[in-house]
Amino acid sequence: MKVKLIRHTPEPEKLVAIAARLCYSPVGVEDLDEQLNMEAARKLVKFVIKSGHLSTTEHVCFTFGIEGISRVLSHQLVRHRIASFNQQSQRYVKFKENYEYIVPDSIKQNKEIDEKYKSFISDIHKFYEEMINSGIDAEDARYILPNSSETKMIVTMNARELLHFFTVRCCKRAQAEIRELATLMLKDVKKVAPVIFENAGPNCLRTLCPEGKYSCGKPPSASDFEA
Ligand SMILES: Cc1cc2nc3c(=O)[nH]c(=O)nc-3n(C[C@H](O)[C@H](O)[C@H](O)COP(=O)(O)OP(=O)(O)OC[C@H]3O[C@@H](n4cnc5c(N)ncnc54)[C@H](O)[C@@H]3O)c2cc1C
């Protein structure tokens, strides 16, 4: 899996602080921008995150380039509605020599099953190629491709949505592949907005686990999500 933070709003924490300060200040936007130094901005960001004044975090966006993930993962990812997505098309791209697929760790670790898995996928791909070579459109031939097929995406989320995304997808209850993705994304955004994402991650980092009898009982620490 390859994840890269390819763009983000410049000075994300300063912008959140400006939005917060504006709510309570008689001065204009330009003056606020000039008056706020980074130390004051970070203090204010800490306060708004703690107090739950999270609309201020909606002004900053983060865009990720993601490769080497399965369609199992992408299907879960696009359930997050406050986000923007583009995904490599299986209609316009024909997967001939360039067909890739994902093997989950539990399968990799079982030699016999791993071999069967690869041989099964190889048979599926042979039939896919046969269909393409017989003139079947890629948009129809793709019906045979499995959930494990590799895909690429560009994903943009604002900081508020990311905080929510990290809460549900960095949790051990989340499926392994999307948890790996969420963890890598969190490590990336922490480098550019350490205060906004200081305590981001599963609920149990901040409060009691809400999972009841499904709780893993092993809360992580914030440092598990640092690069
Ligand atoms: C461990 C786990 C298991 C899951 N299992 C299943 C499953 O078996 N089947 C299944 O179908 N899904 C499953 N999901 C997906 C889950 O139901 C959500 O679709 C997904 O996590 C997106 O989260 P969300 O809806 O909270 O937030 P997002 O879509 O990311 O939106 C963020 C927040 O915005 C608000 N919001 C967004 N849209 C609306 C709206 N229309 N109305 C009101 N408020 C809104 C909500 O507060 C929401 O939490 C699972 C998710 C997890 C983490």
Image (cartoon, helix red, strand yellow):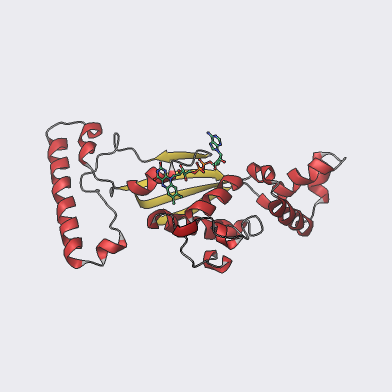
| Number of numbered callouts drawn | 0
- The residue most toward the right is 26
Q: Does 20 appear above or below 171?
A: above
**Between residues 69 and 38, which one lies in front from this camera angle?**
69
> Residue visible at 79% across and 42% down?
22
Q: Is residue 88 left or right of residue 123?
A: right
Q: Does 10 appear above or below 132?
A: below
| Residue 218 seen in this snapshot | yes
Please identify the quarter of the rendering in which residue 210 is found: bottom right
Q: Is residue 201 left or right of residue 24?
A: left
Q: Is residue 59 left or right of residue 164?
A: right
| Residue 11 seen in this snapshot | no
In the rendered image, residue 105, in percent from the top left (x then y), is placed at: 31, 63
> Residue visible at 25% across and 39% down?
94
Please identify the quarter of the rendering in which residue 43 is found: bottom right
- The residue most toward the front is 213
Q: Quadrant of the N terminus?
A: bottom left
Please identify the quarter of the rendering in which residue 136 is found: top left
> Residue visible at 28% across and 50% down?
148
> Residue visible at 74% across and 43% down?
19
**Between residues 27 and 202, which one lies in front from this camera angle?**
202
